Amino acid sequence: MKEGDDKLRWVQALRGVAVLCVVLTHARYLLQNTDQFPLAQCLLYPGAMGVDLFFIISGFIMVYTTAGATGARAALLFGVKRFARIWPAYAVVTVLYLLLRRGGPEFFTDIDRIGAFIRSLLFIPVDPADPPFFGFAFPLGWTLAFEMYFYLVFGLCMLTGRLRWFTFCAWMLLTLVLLPMGRGGPSLNVRQQLEFSAPYLHLVTNPIVFEFLAGVAIGHLYRCAWFRVRSVQVAWLLVVCGIGFAAWYVFGNIGMFHGPREWGWPLALMVLLLALASKTVVLDPPAPLVWLGTVSYSMYLTHYLGQWLLVGYVSRWGIDTQTWAQVFLTVLCALPLAAVAHWLLEQKLSGAVRRMLTAGLRRVLPAPPQGAER
């Protein structure tokens, strides 16, 4: 989504909500081994659904931003932009995490650890028997592995021109239905273990990918002229009921884990209803939530390590770190950390990589005549 697209400010705000929920769910670990942990688990654990919300939003945004874009040049530009935004920042944070939390330089003296590091950078499951997390060297890397896989498939299907969506559907049918059928599937259980010999097949066949597909379907509906309601009152009712139902299902512990059959489907329903209502009424979320959405990737990458570093620093002053006050402090400090990381990692580092790769691509593939790739 382009910054400044007022029509989709509500999507950016959803990203802000999603990342804030993830930060809070990780902050609950500060209260482990205290009498407050059961309460923290009840209140904050459901925030892990922010990951599922991110996946649904990704599918929606990919349809919205690539509408009508097909052909080799469009696909490669899409891939370059996605790679430049995700991978450089992820690689930097992964290295910092290993240096600061996993033994420092000694981590890289063990051949098995080096192998895990390389597979993590390539988004290849390190431990295929642990879906959907897969044992990545940087614990939060599992979500980015699914993101990058989805971007890869999306970009490759753009190469097929008018057959783009046929190719996309055929690939999803193959990976999510036909391949699992030979291994005891398919299922909607994201913890399924299908025992493929190739580690990457465990990722591509994981049913959490259905959440991206839900976002894709919502994106297509959003672009349809007939997909709207005429009544303003009905539109606002959809907004309230969509958000309310998702909140009840997730925080009422009806759903208990990631995946389309748990947190995924009520969140997809919420996004669907918000998308429908947004075509009738203006959804104008608070500016702070929109800003959080803007820095959400940087906040997601850095908050986990930031929480650990902050707790270590505060404990040196003799302050009890296992309190709700410290939960608040780590969430508060995640905000400026995200702002700095957004500037350094996304705007500077990723921006430089994107410009370099894009310039090289344009030299190799000059712009075709208008409409030539449609």
Image (spheres, rainbow, N blue to C red):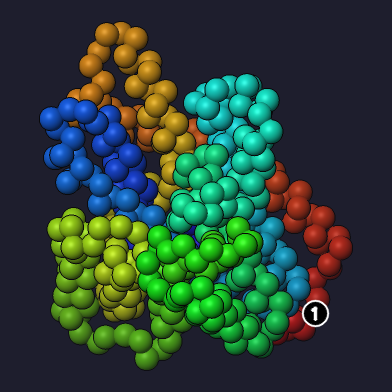
Q: Nearer the viewer, residue 159 or 176?
A: 176
- Which residue is painted at 63% across and 39% down in the image? 117
Amino acid at the residue labelled 1: Pro
Rendered residue at 23%/24% (across/down): 322
Q: Residues within 10 Å of mark 1 (few under 14, many from 20)?
A: few
Q: Residue 190, how many percent across, how many down? A: 40, 63
- The quarter holding residue 158 reads bottom right
The answer to whether 30 is drawn above or below residue 41 in the figure is above
x, y (%) of residue 109? 68, 25
Measuring from the top left, give residue 280's x and y in whole percent: 29, 79
Q: Nearer the viewer, residue 85 or 210?
A: 210
Q: Nearer the viewer, residue 277 or 246?
A: 246
Quadrant for the C terminus in the image:
bottom right
Q: Is residue 117 visible?
A: yes
Residue 172 in view in this figure: no
Residue extending farthest to the top is: 317
Say which residue appears at 29% left-offset and 43% top-offset: 25
Residue at mark 1: 369
